[in-house]
Amino acid sequence: QGQLVAEGGGSAQSGGSLRLSCAASEYINKRYCMGWFRQAAGKEREGVAAIDGEGKIMYSDSVKGRFTISQDNAANTLYLKMDSLKPEDTAMYYCAVGPFYADYEAPTDFHFWGPGTQVTVSS
């Protein structure tokens, strides 16, 4: 079993940008679904964006148009570019691996998780 290492979290002002990366050498381009999730204090973990085994990209309504998920097969890395950040984006962000057609709205579909990286957005 490989490792998932998420990096790039930090602090940003409202309207700013951050880019998260997730080194996933065992899983990129191996026909898994790769997803980004977040969990704010006192809230349930929620799906943010995912790329399924066919390359279909999905976003939650709360980030659509602001966040961009991508993967670099050569670098074996999954990315999440976050623009127009809002204070409500503040959360611990995780990358995870699921089966080919995993539903990003169902975190329990994803069976392998990396440690999270904290994103804090101030107004």
Image (cartoon, helix red, strand yellow):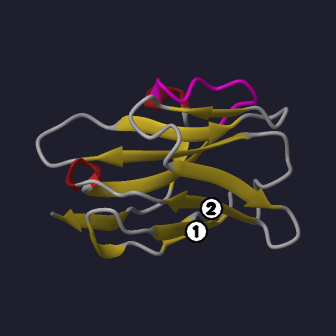
Tag 2 or tag 1, which sits nearer the N-term? 1
26, 38: nearer the viewer: 38
- Seen at 84% across and 40% down, the residue is 31
- Seen at 11% across and 41% down, the residue is 42
Q: Is residue 102 magenta?
A: yes
Residue 118: x and y, percent? Answer: 31, 66
- Seen at 78% across and 67% down, the residue is 76
> Would you place residue 18 above or below residue 55 in this image?
below
Q: Quadrant of the C terminus?
A: bottom left
Mark 2: which secondary structure? Answer: strand
Asked whether the beta carbons under mark 1 and mark 2 sit within 8 Å of each other, the answer is yes
Instruction: Give left or right: position of 20 versus 123.
Output: right
Q: Which residues are magenta?
A: 98-106
Check disc 2: other Cα within 10 Å, few if <14, some if 14-19, many if 20+: many
Residue where numbered disc 2 is placed: 79
The image quadrant of residue 46 is top left
Which kind of residue does numbered mark 2 sit on? Tyr
111, 31: nearer the viewer: 31
Instruction: Give left or right: position of 123 versus 18.
Output: left
Q: Quadrant of the N terminus?
A: bottom right
Mark 1: which secondary structure? Answer: strand
Which kind of residue does numbered mark 1 sit on? Ser
> Would you place residue 108 above or below residue 88 in this image?
above
Residue where numbered disc 1 is placed: 21
- Seen at 24% across and 64% down, the residue is 121
- As measured in the structure, the alpha-carbon distance from the residue carrying label 1 to the one carrying label 2 is 4 Å
Residue 110: x and y, percent? Answer: 55, 35
